[in-house]
Image: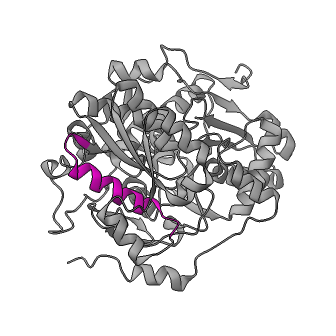
Amino acid sequence: MSQIPYKIYLTEEEMPKAWYNLRADMKNKPAPLLNPGTHEPMKAEELGGVFCEELVKQELDNTTPYFDIPEEILGFYKMYRPSPLVRAYCLEKKLGTPAKIYYKFEGNNTSGSHKLNSAIAQAYYAKKQGLKGVTTETGAGQWGTALSMACAYLGLDCKVYMVKVSYEQKPFRREVMRTYGASVTPSPSMETEVGKKILAEHPGTTGSLGCAISEAVEVATTTEGYRYVLGSVLNQVLLHQSIIGLETKAALDKYGVKPDIIIGCAGGGSNLGGLIAPFMGEKLRGEADYRIIAVEPASCPSLTRGKYAYDFCDTGMVCPLAKMYTLGSGFIPAPNHAGGLRYHGMSSVLSQLYDDGLMEATSVKQTDVFEAAETFARVEGILPAPESSHAIKVAIDEALKCKETGEEKTIVFGLTGTGYFDMVAYEKFHDGQMTDYIPTDEELQASFDKLPKMD
C-alpha cells in the first residue's frame, strides 16, 4: 500500500454523481410524518404546501437507492468539492496513540460548513419550480449562511429566522448572510403570530431551533411564491448530505483503508447522517461492520436522554409530527455555544437506526468540548466549529483508549466546519466563564409530559 498523503482528494472523475438514499437499505423504515390534526401519514399534496414539489418526492421515497445529482448542482459543487479527507498525523503524534485518525473537512467554503451541500440542492429545486423565494431557520448561522449563498447564486429571495442567542452571539455570521442578500430576523420575533405566542409564554427566551422553524414555516405558508427549506432533520437533507460519506468512502477505498469507528456530531442529524450513509448501507446489507457514534451536547441530549415518540418538529406546533428521539418540542435548551446542536429532536432516519441498535450515542459537556477543540487547533491548524468539536472530543477519547490497549484502530470523524465566527464562545472558555448546564430529570420529564397524545 502506498503512503497515505496528509490530504486525500478525489479527482473530478472520481466524484460521486448521485446521492445515496440510506432508507432504501433499511429493513425498518423510518416512521412516516403524520398530520397533526388527523394523525394520518402526510400525503405529498399536503407537504407540497410547505416544501418544494421535487423535495417532497425525495422526502417520501423509501425505496430508490440513488438519485442523480442534477448537472447544475454538480457544477456548483465543483467550486468547493471534493472536500479533503485529512490524515491527522499531528494529532496522532500529540496523543501518542497507535490509532489512525482521519477527518472529513467540510469548512472549505464561505459558509464555513457542510450545510452548502443541501442548500444549493433545495434552492435549485425552488428555482426550478418557479418560486420567488424561500424561508428557513438557522441556529449557529451556518445553514442560514449556506442558504443565502445558494439563493444569491440562483437569484432567489431568502428570509432567515436566526435563534436569538446566536443572533446576538454571532453578529458577523449574520452580516455574511446579509452580504448575500438575505433578511435575518432574531427568533422568536414579533413578526409572526407564533413568535408572539412563544414570547408571551416565555418572556425573554433566548430561542431555539424549534421556535425559529415555527416562524419560518408560518411565513412560507402565508406568503405567495415562497416555500420553507430546512437545514437538517428531514430525509431529503440526509440524502443531499450523503455526498460527504460517499466522498469519504471513495477516498478511503482509494488507499485500501477500512475504518473501525466513525464519529459525527449530532444536532438534527444532517452531518452525521451524511457522513455515515454509505458505511451504514454496507452494515445494513451485511457487507461490512463499523462502530458508529453520534455525539451530542449534554445540554440538549435528545438521543441519550430523550423519548422515542411522535412529536412536533417545531416549538410552535405548526409542523407535522415526526417519530424521533425527542426532548419535547417545548424544550428550550440552555444557551449552549454549539448553536447548531440546540434542537429538541433527531432525524427520523437516525432515530430508527439508533433504536435498532445499529449506532451508538454519547453526550459530552461543553467545557470538555472546547478543551478538545483547542488541542485540535494547536496541532492540526484548523479552528473547529463548536459543533464539530463534539466529534473531535470523542475521537480523541477513542484514540486514547487505543493508546491504553495498544490497538491500531482506524477512526474517521466529521469536521463539519470552522469556528471563526464563534470567537465569543472561545473567549468565554478562555476567560473561565463557560458553564456546563445539564438538564435535570425533572426538567426533561416536565417536557415529556407535554408530548402529543397518540391514539
Q: Which quarter of the rendering shows the C terminus?
A: bottom left
Q: Main secondary structure of the magenta part?
A: helix
Displayed quadrant of residue 67: top left
| Left-right relation of 368 to 310 | right
**Please, which residue is most extreme toward the front here?**
190
Location of residue 98 by image quarter? top right
Q: Quadrant of the N terminus?
A: top right
**Residue 225 included in the magenta stretch of the image:** yes
The magenta segment is 205-226
Query: Where residue 379 appears, x then y in whole percent?
Result: 82, 39
Q: Nearer the viewer, residue 210 or 23?
A: 210
Q: Position of residue 72 (x, y in %)?
A: 35, 19
Q: Residue placed at 81% from the left, 64% from the top?
A: 432
Q: How many marks?
A: 0
Whether residue 225 is visible, yes or no, is yes
Residue 46 picture location, percent across and down: 15, 52
Q: Depth check: 277 or 214 in front? A: 214
Q: Residue at x 62, y 27 (%)?
A: 84
Q: Quadrant of residue 40?
A: bottom left
Task: Give me the residue at 48% from left, 19% from top.
Answer: 78
